Image (cartoon, rainbow, N blue to C red):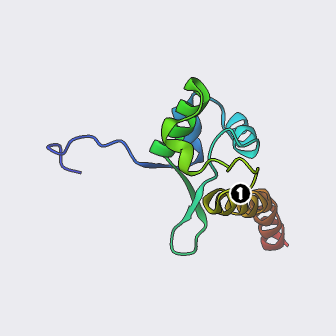
Amino acid sequence: MPDDLPRLEPRYLDRRQAAAYLGVSTSTFDEEVEAGQWPQPRRRGAKGGRYTWDRKLLDSFADRHSYGPDPGASANAAPESGALSDDAVRQTAEAAALRGLLHAAPRNRAQHRQQKAA
C-alpha cells in the first residue's frame, strides 16, 4: 500500500475487531450479542460465510445504552398496542436466524476437522 494514502479505519469489523473496538473479550462480545446488547452480524463474502459488524451500528447501539432511547429510533418503536413494527420483526427474525448459524459454525468446523483427520 502506498505511503501517501491516509490510514482508514474499516467500516465493517470482524468479531475480533468488534470486540476490541468495544473494549471486551471475544467471549464477552459473543455473550452480549446473544443477549441483544449489540447488533447481530451481517453475512458477507461470496458464500456468505464471513460475519461482520457495522462500526456505526455498534456506535448507535452504544449510544442507546449510554444515553437512553435514541430520539431517531421512534420509527422502529413499537406502537402503543404492543405490536412490533415491520422493521423490528424483520430484525428479530434475522437475529434469530443468525444466532442459529453462529452457534452451528464452530460445531461444523470441528466436525469437518474430524472428518478430514479420519
Q: Residue 20: x and y, percent?
A: 55, 33
State the quadrant of the C terminus: bottom right
Q: Which residue corresponds to the image point at 61% horizontal and 30% vertical from the top-left?
A: 65
Instruction: Tell me, yes or no, if residue 18 can be seen here.
Output: yes
- Answer yes or no: is residue 17 visible: no
The location of residue 48, given as percent across then percent down, is 58, 70
Residue 109: percent from left, percent from top: 75, 63
| 62 relative to 112 in the view: left or right | left
Of 58 and 19, nearer the camera is: 58
Q: Quadrant of residue 36?
A: top right
Judged left or right of residue 72, residue 117 is: right
- x 65%, y 58%: residue: 85
Q: Is residue 100 above or below residue 24?
A: below
> Which structural element holds mark 1?
helix
Q: Nearer the viewer, residue 61 or 7?
A: 61
Foreground residue, 81 or 51? Answer: 81
Residue behind mark 1: 92
Q: Quadrant of residue 35?
A: top right
